[in-house]
Amino acid sequence: MKLSSPFFHHALPTNRLMLLVCLALLPGAFIQIYFFGFGVLINLLSCALFAIGAEYFVLYLRKRNPLTTLKDNSALLTGLLLGLALPPTLPIWMTLIGVSFAIIFAKQLYGGLGFNPFNPAMTGYVLLLISFPVEMTSWMPSREISLNFPTFIESLQLILFSETSSGHSAEFYRNIADGFTMATPLDYTKTEFTLGHMTSEIFSQQNFSNNLNGWMWVNIGFLLGGIYLLVSKIIRWHIPFSFLLGITITSQALHTYDSQLYTPTWFHLITGATMLGAFFIATDPVSATTTPKGRIIYGLLIGFLVVIIRTFGGYPEAVAFAILLLNLATPMIDHYTKPIVYGHKSESSND
């Protein structure tokens, strides 16, 4: 089966295309496992299995051949993307809810691959974030500052039973000193700003800088994977470039206005799911725009919304919200950015 899309320069089979995108995730995934623990690996494996299982179940109910559809690897990719976005100690039953919703309601309910208007992985992520905000924003501190880095068995016990055989909860492993818990850089800065602290004070803290270092390397890993996708011509440059440009313009404008109240551009680029969103999620060929001009507008608006939501919104991370909001606007953007047919001055002259 061929998947025709303006994102792809080559008519690659769908299964090979999806598999190449999965492979491009590996550099960022390995780095994320190193800095934030084996819980990331467990999430990846469980999300992949849950996604394939949910797709098989729905296809069976629809009297379709499950094995034929599962071979396209789209369910696998959805599971991996969602697994990378989940905290490494998230209870397994929450993971099952998020993955099942992504596959059943955000994908198969609309008819399957090629018909879903919203990105399935981000739909599942947002459902979990809204339903379980505390658990979904409780990440492990980076390996460099963690006092009690969990082993694989301990990570598995936390995910399955919410505590280890020694009786330690996830909170025990999040502490970095004297009961102090380090949140993600985005969450931490948002909290510090509400307490009246300035940018210079926040960025001068050693623990914050060390924790930020882990997220920087994770984003570099996904950037390398994204570059591979660009060089291989699996995706085009328009959306990733405009996405990062939108973040740069918006964050720089705010930082220039008040450097003590708004974080600098480099901070937005190396934290959270910036590179994962730019190269792997926003470029989804089904839910993204399809015209050349439309892709530029689409990416710019996502980048703009990412900074605005991170800065003024109630949630520290904003990539999923920004992408889903622009998924809503995709038909309108495509409608008003249709390329003019060769030999005609405007669309109306085609009649």
Image: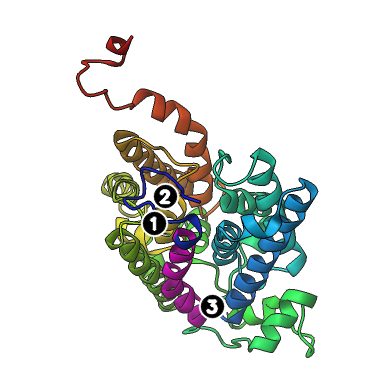
Which residue corresponds to the image point at 64% horizontal and 61% vertical from the top-left?
136
Q: Secondary structure at mark 1?
A: helix
**In contact (CB < 8 Å): disc 3 and disc 1:** no
- Give amino acid for label 1: Phe
State which quarter of the image contains the C terminus.
top left
Spatial separation of the CA atoms under disc 1 and disc 2: 6 Å
The crowding category of the residue bearing disc 2, from other C-alpha atoms within 10 Å (few below 14, some 14 to 19, many at least 20), is many
- Give amino acid for label 2: Thr
| Label drawn at residue 283 | 2
| Label drawn at residue 36 | 3
Query: Image check: 279 left or right of 82?
Result: left
Where residue 34 appears, as percent x and y from the top left, is 49, 82
**In contact (CB < 8 Å): disc 3 and disc 2:** no
| Label drawn at residue 279 | 1
Front label number (3 vs 1): 1
Which residue corresponds to the image point at 79% horizontal and 86% vertical from the top-left?
167
Q: To which quarter of the image does residue 229 belong?
A: bottom left
- In primary-sequence order, the first of circles 3 and 1 is 3
The crowding category of the residue bearing disc 1, from other C-alpha atoms within 10 Å (few below 14, some 14 to 19, many at least 20), is many
Spatial separation of the CA atoms under disc 3 and disc 1: 22 Å
| Label drawn at residue 262 | none
Q: Secondary structure at mark 2?
A: loop
Identify the magenta region: 17-35
Is residue 21 in the magenta section?
A: yes
Which residue corresponds to the image point at 68% horizontal and 68% vertical from the top-left?
49
**In contact (CB < 8 Å): disc 1 and disc 2:** yes
